[in-house]
Image (tube, rainbow, N blue to C red):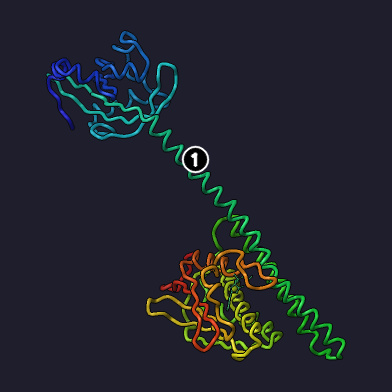
Amino acid sequence: RACLPCLDKKIHLTRASLDNAVEAIITIDSIGTIETVNHATYKMFGYATQEIIGQNVRMLMPEPFKSEHDHYLSRYLTTDSPKIIGTGREALAVRQTGEIFPIHLSVSEVHDQGKRSFVGLIRDITTQRLAEQQSREHRDELAHADRLNMLGEMASGIAHEINQPLTAISLFAQAGKRFLESGKHDRIPDIFDQLSQHALRAGAVVESMQNFARRGENQREATQCSRLINKIVDFAESEARMRDVIVSLDEIEQSVTIVVDVVQIQQVVLNLLRNGMEAMQSVNFVNGNLIKLQTTLREDGDLEVAVIDSGSGVSEDEKSTLFTPFSSTKEKGMGMGLSICREIITAHGGHLMFKNLESGGAKFYFTLPIERNGASNG
Ligand code: ADP
């Protein structure tokens, strides 16, 4: 606690410097009566000398501090328990005009010949607060613009993601018609199952996108890697059959737990599988009709999921724009798939990458952090 003996003398000696201070400096006695003030006090609070000296310091405070101040002061004098004395803090003050403004206040106790009084140092922080608020508003505006941007991208994304189950539905419907025409009625129930599954999947994609838009976060759950992959293979295999592609599962890592938005990760893998199958089709399966889905544990401890195709490989021209929205070499492609995939994987704390293979074809692979204790935290 600061102890400044002979304050009056000191104040007198240093009057000029006190009056030049930007801070208001106010001394009060033990019951709160204002004894001295410097020039900045008049400027800050808007009172004339005679209006302020001899008044209770409460006049400079807004409610509820105004009513509580006597109580604070007497409690401090009887218990000596410091609340604000000796430390600085932010508070509110009130000008003569009634305007309430933010201040930084530090109070020291002064002992002068057995008399206890207090010196308050007050800095007006209105400008600082205003600047902070403006920068907060600016940040909010940026965030808003960002969200609008994202919504725009998302609309294209939804179109892209919904197109895939719709394409599958159309393919299965055509196949169903062929089975009917050729009398293969035993195949029809399977076709209906597939139609229903892909329709449900389209619904799940919309829901997942809606959640993403609404809360800006994903619906994550702790999932066993093998469960996730098996579900994807279920979906992919029926489509692969239609395209005469064989999906082989190379599951080196089965038991690890990952905390993911299952629908989104499925979406990524399905996208990669579909891209791979299309790349294979585009070269008429010259490198075979096998597409591999592989899960491994990396040396850095992350899970790696890879889709290894035997297609065209990524062309030199394509390499730099692959993950840019709206870049596609396909006639009906929107070029949104990979950019969304990368966004999803990045949001999960992983990376999506690719490389061309010597044998022809490409490997698209992504990492995901593994949940070490196996428990859900999301
Ligand atoms: P879209 O599928 O709508 O074209 P994507 O973002 O999924 O959009 O893919 C962008 C482009 O990347 C594709 O048009 C294609 O040229 C290339 N590409 C993606 N995957 C592969 C792959 N496995 N092999 C070769 N090229 C690929």
Q: Quadrant of residue 215?
A: bottom right
Q: Position of residue 223 (x, y in %)?
A: 52, 74
- For this orientation, the residue located farthest to the top is 50
Does 169 appear above or below 41? below
Q: Count the labels in the image.
A: 1
Between 209 and 56, the residue placed more toward the observer is 209
- Identity of the amino acid at label 1? Glu
Q: Residue at x 54, y 86 (%)?
A: 360
Q: Position of residue 280 (x, y in %)?
A: 62, 84
Drawn side of residue 53 relative to residue 218, left or right = left
- The residue tagged 1 is 137
- For this orientation, the residue located farthest to the front is 317
Q: Residue at x 14, y 25 (%)?
A: 4
Residue neighbourhood size for the residue with mark 1, other residues' Cα within 10 Å, grouped as few (<14), some (14–19), many (≥20): few
Drawn side of residue 39 relative to residue 140, left or right = left
| Distance from mark 1 CB to nearest ligand 1 atom below 8 Å | no
- Of the four image quadrants, the one with ligand 1 is bottom right
Q: Quadrant of residue 94?
A: top left
Does 79 appear above or below 18? below
Q: Quadrant of residue 54?
A: top left
Does 44 appear above or below 272? above
Between 118 and 161, the residue placed more toward the observer is 161
Q: Position of residue 371 (x, y in %)?
A: 44, 72
Between 226 and 322, the residue placed more toward the observer is 322
Between 175 and 85, the residue placed more toward the observer is 175
Q: Position of residue 225 (x, y in %)?
A: 51, 78
Tell me the SS state at disc 1.
helix
Q: Residue at x 16, y 16 (%)?
A: 8
Drawn side of residue 364 relative to residue 285, left or right = left
